[in-house]
Image: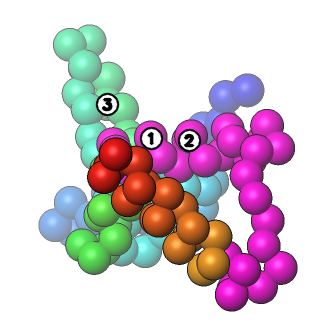
Amino acid sequence: MTTRARARLRHKGQLTLPPEVRDALHIAEGDEVEFTITEEGEVLLRGMTSVPADQRWFWTAEWQDGEREASEQIAAGQGTRFDTEAAFLDHLEKLHAEADAEQDA
């Protein structure tokens, strides 16, 4: 399905994107857009959502690899569920002690 929308260029080159275009780009006020001009003279527009600097770590390749791995494990029914924080912390301490024992061996 193709949707067409129009906007009028204003003073200083300003343009208001129609709501259906903003929705298609998944952008909101404060987000950026990227323009790509093809050899044929077509202009492609892509929405760019800004990520706060203190949250960039989440979008690193390494972190995203870990997120994908965790999602796959959850989907496969792998993992351990804990009823209390204390049970979770006890499990972590046990894993840490096992790792230390392996390293000492």
State the SS at label 1: helix
The quadrant in which residue 71 appears is top right
Q: Assess whether mark 1 and mark 2 are in contact (beta carbons under 8 angstroms).
A: yes
User: Type of residue at label 1?
Assistant: Asp
**Magenta range:** 61-88
* Residue 50 position in % (x across, y down): 33, 65
Residue 21 shows in this picture: no
Q: Tell me, yes or no, whether the highlighted magenta stretch contains residue 83.
A: yes
User: Type of residue at label 2?
Assistant: Arg
Which residue in the structure is indicated by mark 3? Answer: 43
Q: Residue 19 or 67: which is nearer the viewer? A: 67
Residue depth check, mark 3 versus mark 2: number of the one nearer the observer:
2
Task: Please identify the residue farthest to the top as the structure is shown.
Answer: 40
Which residue in the structure is indicated by mark 2? Answer: 68
Say which residue appears at 60% left-offset and 56% top-offset. 23
| 10 Å crowding of disc 3: few (<14), some (14-19), many (20+) | few
Which residue in the structure is indicated by mark 1? Answer: 65
Q: How is the image coloured?
A: rainbow
* Residue 58 position in % (x across, y down): 38, 60
